[in-house]
Amino acid sequence: MEPTSRAYPMRVFVKHRAKEQIKARAYDRSGDSSQGGTASHRPLYSPFDERLFEDIATTLLSPSRPEFRHQCKSRQEAAEIEARIAAELVEIYAQIKLNQRDPLVQMLNALL
């Protein structure tokens, strides 16, 4: 009988991967002079907001989330699930940080 390798997606891997992706994407390079723009690199979501990240991660990486209870057939399958969830965390973080820069959002927050 062949040994069966079983694995579960791990939240710690998701958090690490997402944090590294966020830090790598921290600057807007759309104005890169190599693409015909200016050489200024405006921070998109820098500095890294650890509290916001942890709040999103706590919600998104809930132990009750079905993906974390799913026993995968291989470590590769678990890694694919981790990558997908990490990308979701990155997108949520980026959207919140971009919304925070919106003048209308800033004005409404000031009214609170």
Image: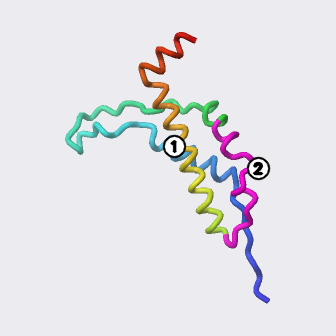
Under tag 2, what secondary structure?
loop
Query: Taking 22 as reference, is 61 left or right?
Result: right
The residue wearing badge 1 is: 91
Q: Which residues are magenta?
A: 56-74
Residue 18 in percent (x, y) is at 57, 47
Asked if residue 17 lies in the magenta stretch, the reply is no
Amino acid on which the number 1 mark rests in the picture: Glu
How far apart, in angstroms, are the residues tagged by discs 2 and 1? 21 Å
In this view, 97 is above or below 109 = below
Query: Taking 8 as reference, is 18 left or right?
Result: left
The answer to which quarter of the image holds residue 8 is bottom right
Q: Nearer the viewer, mark 2 or mark 1?
A: 2
Residue 93 in percent (x, y) is at 54, 37
Amino acid on which the number 2 mark rests in the picture: Ser
Dot label at residue 64: 2
Label 2 packing within 10 angstroms: few (<14), some (14-19), many (20+): few
Under tag 1, what secondary structure?
helix
Q: Residue furthest left?
A: 36
Residue 62 in percent (x, y) is at 73, 46
In this view, 1 is above or below 109 = below
Dot label at residue 9: none
Q: Are marks 2 and 1 in contact (CB under 8 Å)?
A: no
Identify the residue shown where x is 76% and y is 58%: 69
Query: Taking 92 as reference, is 14 left or right?
Result: right
Query: Upstream in the sequence, badge 2 or badge 1?
Result: 2
Where does the C terminus fall, quadrant-wise? top right
Q: Residue furthest top?
A: 111
Identify the residue shown where x is 42% and y is 19%: 103
Label 1 packing within 10 angstroms: few (<14), some (14-19), many (20+): some
Residue 44 in percent (x, y) is at 43, 33
Identify the residue shown where x is 60% and y is 52%: 85
